[in-house]
Amino acid sequence: FPDEYRITPQTIMRNFQDTWSLRVGGETWLELGSYQIDLRAGVMYEKSAVPREYLSTLTIDLDKIVVGLGGSVHVTPTWRIDWMLARTFTTPVDVSPDEAKFEMLTPVRANKPDPALRDYVNAGRYEANATLLGVGLAVNYL
């Protein structure tokens, strides 16, 4: 191979769109012995920012609902331990070969092929879910 191997510039069209979300949550606290315990819960719905025809394994963004629980234990007036647990639920999306618009990258070519001859590689079923766990330590110096 030559010392320098040149490829054509690559453009990945993901076509992100403006989106919106709805969120609601609450927090309360209680005394448990000498500790203050904070409890939190919330739920969120978010519309995907990626049109279905541009979904790919590079950009999996589906309509989703996230349910979260969390809390804190105030160990001292200065030290606090935080925790959270959240679950993301998504709506599966099927992209047919006819609607797929994520073009196959071909870096070694002289010219871009005619649009009628391009290959689109993102057809398929997309689904994703996640469970999130978190632990934190907060120190209040003031």
Image: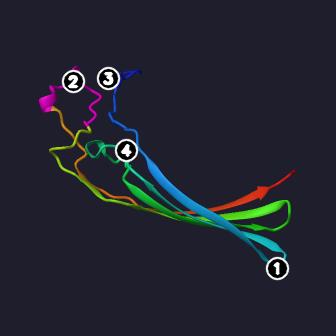
**Image-quadrant location for residue 116:** top left
Q: Residue 52 in the image: state x and y as whole percent.
A: 28, 46
> Which label sits on residue 112?
2
What is the span of residues highlighted in magenta in the rendered image?
Answer: 103-117
Q: Mark 4: which secondary structure?
A: loop
Q: CA distance from mark 4 to mark 1?
A: 50 Å
Mark 3 neighbour class, 10 Å CA radius: few under 14, some 14 to 19, many 20 or more: few
Q: Is residue 13 above or below residue 131?
A: above
Q: Which mark is residue 33?
A: 1
The residue nearer to you, when weighing 76 against 12, is 76
Along the polypeptide, which appears first: circle 3 or circle 4? Answer: 3
Viewer-proximal residue among 123 and 44 = 44
| Cα distance between the residues tagged 3 and 2 | 10 Å
> Badge 1: few (under 14), some or many (20 or more) residues near its Cα, within 10 Å?
few
Q: Disc 3, disc 4: CB below 8 Å?
A: no
Is 63 inside the magenta-drawn segment?
Answer: no
Q: Amino acid at mark 2?
A: Lys
Between marks 3 and 2 in the image, the one whose residue lies nearer the viewer: 2
According to the image, label 3 marks what residue? 8
CA distance for labels 4 and 2? 22 Å
Q: CA distance from mark 3 to mark 1?
A: 67 Å
Around disc 2, counting alpha carbons within 10 Å, would you say few (fewer than 14), some (14 to 19), or many (20 or more)? few
- Residue drawn at point x = 21 percent, y = 20 percent: 111
Among numbered discs 4 and 1, the one appearing first in the sequence: 1
Secondary structure, mark 1, is loop
